[in-house]
Amino acid sequence: MFLSTRSIAALLVLSSVVAIGVIGSYILGQIGNNFNEHMDLINAIYFTITTLSTVGYGDIVPITPIAKIFVVILIIMGLGAFLTAVTSISSDLATRDIVSLSEKIEKMEEELITPQILLIGSGQINVNLMKILKEKKKKYVLLVSDKIEAERFRSEGNKAYAINMLSEEEIARFHPEKAKIIVIDMNNVSDMIYVLLILSEIAKEAKIIVIVHDTDTEKRVQTVKKLKDIEIINPSSIVANEIALKL
């Protein structure tokens, strides 16, 4: 259990009040008949605790004005110290439980959204891949930049999320470093290059496949290969070559 500085301070104040109560009761009990019973150390501790906790069994009571004044002061001091300590410690316990629950929820969310296959971008290849992975019940996540698009995909039962593609923090939420394969199929070439640069830093072990649709984009993506070993696939070029072989 961890306690805040406020709780520790409250406990120290409460301990000081208890010490004052025990010492004061003991001294008053020794110097005169200030209580209806002999006040030895055990009775002084017992009387102080029952008084501060407001239990007040009534078996030991002050009978002289000075003893009554001392008890009134002790109660006033003790109630404030006792309530502050209880409130502060209860708050610490509640905070600890909330933090623990938040950590468990966050861990569960991470387990749910950590994919084996991470699809970035809503190009047609990724959209088709998403449908195939869903049918095969593979663990995947599709990241897009358009919220409406993400909501449409989710309404169809897909695991799609809308994020800011230019934010390393938002991309990192989906743990690309734990993905086995990352497929990037984005329409905006500049954003694609930026995402590749981010992934080259945070997803060093993952296999990255980049889908390009023209030779100019392919040349631009080639420049990133110096930072990260990536596989570039140009579907248009592949189809054209296959058709050419049949001619």
Image (cartoon, rainbow, N blue to C red):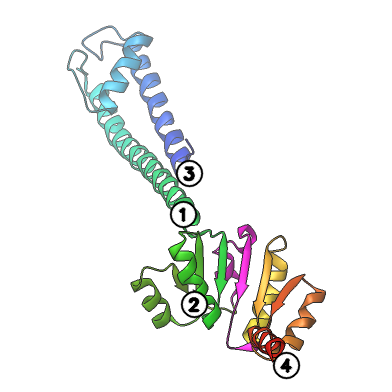
Q: Is residue 233 above or below residue 199?
A: below
Q: Is residue 87 above or below residue 46?
A: below
Amino acid at the residue labelled 2: Val
Give me the disc on residue 4: 3
Q: Mark 4 falls on what kind of element? A: helix
Whichever of labels 3 and 2 marks the residue nearer the N terminus, that label is 3
Q: Is residue 71 left or right of residue 162?
A: left
Question: What residue did someone put label 2 on?
Answer: 127
Whichever of labels 3 and 1 marks the residue nearer the N terminus, that label is 3
Nearer the observer, 50 or 29? 50
Question: What residue did someone put label 1 on?
Answer: 106
Amino acid at the residue labelled 1: Glu
How packed mark 1 is, by other alpha carbons closer than 10 Å (few <14, some 14-19, many 20 or more), is few
Q: Nearer the viewer, mark 4 or mark 1?
A: 4
Q: Is residue 83 magenta?
A: no
Q: Residue 185's spot in the image, x, y percent?
A: 59, 80
Q: Which region of the structure is painted magenta? A: 167-189
Q: Do callouts 4 and 2 mark residues in contact (Cβ within 8 Å)?
A: no
Amino acid at the residue labelled 4: Asp
Give the CA distance from mark 3 to mark 1: 24 Å
Give the CA distance from mark 4 to mark 2: 23 Å
Q: Mark 2 falls on what kind of element? A: helix
Q: Residue at x 26, y 15 (%)?
A: 34
Q: Nearer the viewer, mark 4 or mark 3?
A: 4
Q: Mark 1 falls on what kind of element? A: helix
